[in-house]
Amino acid sequence: MSWPRCEMASGVRPTSTSRPSTGRRPYDKSNHAAHGRYYAERGYIAAMQDVRGRYQSEGSFYPFAHEGPDGYDAVEWLAEQPWCNGKVGTMGASYEAAVQSALGSLNPPHLAAMIVTYGPSSYFHSSMRHNGLLELRFFVYAFSMAATSKEALADPDIKAALDEANAHIWEWVEAGPIRTGSSPLHLVPSYEQWCIDILTHPTYDDYWKQPGYGPRPYYDEHADAPTLYVGGWYDSYTRSSVENFVELSKRQKTPVHLLMGPWHHGGAGLPSAGDLSFLPDGGLSDYESVRLRWFDHFLKDLPTGLEQTRPIRYFLMGGGEGPQERGKTIFHGGEWKSADSWPPPGCTPTPYYVHAEGSLSTDPPSDEPEPSSYTFDPADPVPTIGGHLSAIAIPAGGFDQRNDSRFPFSKGALPLSARRDVLCFTTEPLEEDVEIAGPIVVKLWVSTDAPDTDFTAKLLDVYPPGPNYPEGCALNITDSICRLRFRNGFEQEELGEPGEVYELEFEMYPSANLFAKGHQIRVDISSSNHPRFEVNPNTGGRIGTERRLRKAENSLHHSKSHPSHILLPVMKS
């Protein structure tokens, strides 16, 4: 929720007539009256506003892109009201975090504090598009939001058509890119246009540099307001939360803090993510008081002790008892840590190299074996099993990486490692704990017979066999993907030459995890993770409109001259 907050003069509590009807959210604001009362009872005015074109707001809804100016105006309008002392704070998650960063990028004079939870840094680089691909959750989002549009709520026939489309959303995902007039989205033209735009703007052009698509282009002009960034290791904005903290910490004179829990999207403060439990320490029962403390300190100048805290608090996952005898719960455990900078002091980027026989080690390859090759069929992609998800009907968080009926496009019950198009590289059982905290980078040398294709990377913590997981448990920690045509940057597209060996370097989402003694570290390489990401048709055709599919023969090189590896942020004592 992006709720502008104004401190009450003299601590007078707001009356029903003193609550402004402005705020920054595309969802039904009436559902959050109780949350508003929580702050009103503590001496604040809680203000909410439907964004343009949603619910009681006039105009046409075009998600994210154009939110900056409206947000700026909302902050300044609040500051001018007689019941406001001129200090306005904002808070909220997801879309409401995005609109905070959008208005912050325009630097409204009366913005005095922000709490940005699960928000973007650049919707192009990660979260909407991702290293050149569309995150399909936003394709799904266009349909789900259209079903609650003003047009749908006003016309039962439009509502019925869009509800029917949502009931068959996986069929629409499989059908491929929509075209103008080809889906029920044409009944709400602004939603259809937005969906087509994010599908067909594959390069980092001016379209993606609008304030509503993230503050990355505006860091130098961004409001210098005390900001708390809240993120989760299994959130869909993990990389963005950390990036915003790092970049604005360099520029701002006012405090910037980062709180990173083990949470998925929508699960801030909860001690679980997917099948993982982080009890006893992974939850924050006082999460609301954390936010209240931030506002009390910066909007009311109360003695909160916040100035004595370190700017980063993060949860180191791992070290728990693991899978239990009954049920699917994996007690992964963990502990809270603090730091003054990110990555934390002691972080040592350490290469773990993949080897031809399937091993993963800190020893680089010493010979020139044949590459590991597989056939990537876009008609049969690797299914998404948990991970960094939101706005899509798939469980997010940590799961044993095997086919599972809870996930769409999953088939049978075999582990994903059994697929012919998944390459697995695993360490020996660890002789001591390995702790990581920080950015994670993958460097691969690849080739293909197609003009374009994708390569995925997934980092896993492999539990040894136990009563509930007799084969062990391959737990996903983080992942990413990269499109070959963007190997030299995202401003231009360069198709590949068949058989040519190319170097791909791309960021995974950062993380903090303890790989316990006896566990194994594993890296899986493939070419799809669906429907987390759109599937490459391998034809080299125009992104967002291509209808053809072809198989690709893809190869990963792991030799002395092409030492593919993952760079892990190992913590050294």
Image (tube, grey):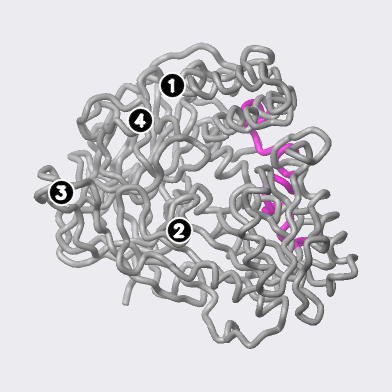
* First of labels 2, 4 by sequence position: 4
Q: Residue at x 60, y 84 (%)?
A: 304
Image disc number at residue 117: none
Q: In this view of the protein, which residue sits in the foreground, 559 or 519?
A: 519
Structural crowding at the residue carrying mark 1, measured as other residues with C-alpha within 10 Å and reported as few (<14), some (14–19) or many (≥20): some
* First of labels 3, 2 by sequence position: 3
Residue 10, how many percent across, how many down? 80, 82
Q: Which residue is mark 3?
A: 326
For the residue marked with disc 1, what is the amino acid? Answer: Pro
Q: CA distance from mark 1 to mark 4?
A: 27 Å
For the residue marked with disc 2, what is the amino acid? Answer: Pro
Q: Which residue is mark 1?
A: 498
* Local SS, label 4: loop
Left or right for 270, reference 139: left
Residue 308, how many percent across, how many down? 55, 86
Instruction: Provide the residue span drawn in magenta.
Output: 197-222
Image disc number at residue 383: 4
Q: Secondary structure of the magenta portion, mostly?
A: helix
> Which residue appears farthest toward the front when viewing the image?
16
- Find out whether the residues at labels 3 and 2 contact each other: C-beta distance under 8 Å: no
Structural crowding at the residue carrying mark 2, measured as other residues with C-alpha within 10 Å and reported as few (<14), some (14–19) or many (≥20): many
Residue 160, how many percent across, how many down? 60, 19
